[in-house]
Image (tube, rainbow, N blue to C red):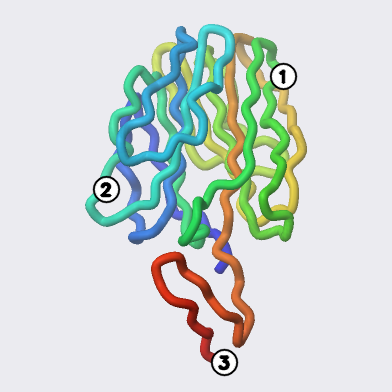
Amino acid sequence: MAISYVGQAVGTNSATLPSFNSGDIAIVFAFRDGSTTNPTVPSGWTNITNTADGTSCSASVGWRRLVDSVTTTGTWTNASRVCVGVYRGCEPFITPVGGGANSAGTTSTTTLAAVTMTRSDGTSWVVGGIGHRSVDTDIEVAFTGMTNRANGVDATAEASLHDTNGGVASWSSTNRTITGTASGWVSRTVELLALPTQTPGEIIICPMLPPMRKPL
């Protein structure tokens, strides 16, 4: 089953999730302006990174497998902006998150860092989150090879979420020169793993169930 994009949401330190199916995966990029003390990853979310620090700014990133009772991102304490993307068809038995990397800077050249892929078979998506201390930039314009999904701006900061909108076998470090006031920014790339394709007669192993053979 291939990964597909479901929806997005933005907020200050919390956001209401879009409509989803139980088992979908949510990725939150939480940006903090004015401090290198990272936003707090709330209970129920698995930390991907809370050490993405820049100049007078920081970010935390986390994921969660959604169930019907989850309606919000929870509170990412001290965040200036949060962006969330929801995806379907991700790896259901182990972590759905593979490789990823942080980047940061203070110039108008922004970067989504290269990913050392866990799977190089072209089934993984790459999601990129970026936050900026200025509010007059165009970080909502997608990096080459990506599609913009979410963008949020307040009085002092802006954050955006992008993804490859399809499976890729690799992701190289990618730059984009933004317009507006050059200032501190941070970014994170995240590999989303797809549910592996099963071939007829292949034995499927689930950690919670005995091995079973897929019907022909």
Is the C-beta separation of discs 2 and 3 under 8 Å?
A: no
Q: Nearer the viewer, mark 2 or mark 3?
A: 3
Q: Quadrant of residue 187?
A: top right
Reading the image, the residue beneath label 3 is 216
Secondary element type, mark 1: strand
Most foreground residue, 147 or 99? 99
Q: Earlier in the sequence, mark 1 or mark 2?
A: 2
Q: CA distance from mark 1 to mark 2?
A: 37 Å
Question: Residue 33, percent across and down?
Answer: 46, 13
Residue 91 in the image: x percent, y percent?
Answer: 52, 59
Label 3 vs 1, first from the N-terminus: 1
Q: Secondary structure at mark 2?
A: loop
**Residue pointed to by mark 1:** 109
Q: Is residue 133 above or below residue 118?
A: above
Residue 72 % position (x, y) = 28, 41
Label 3 Cα neighbours within 10 Å, binned few <14 / some 14-19 / many ≥20: few
Q: Earlier in the sequence, mark 2 or mark 3?
A: 2
Reading the image, the residue beneath label 2 is 70
Q: Which mark is residue 179?
A: none
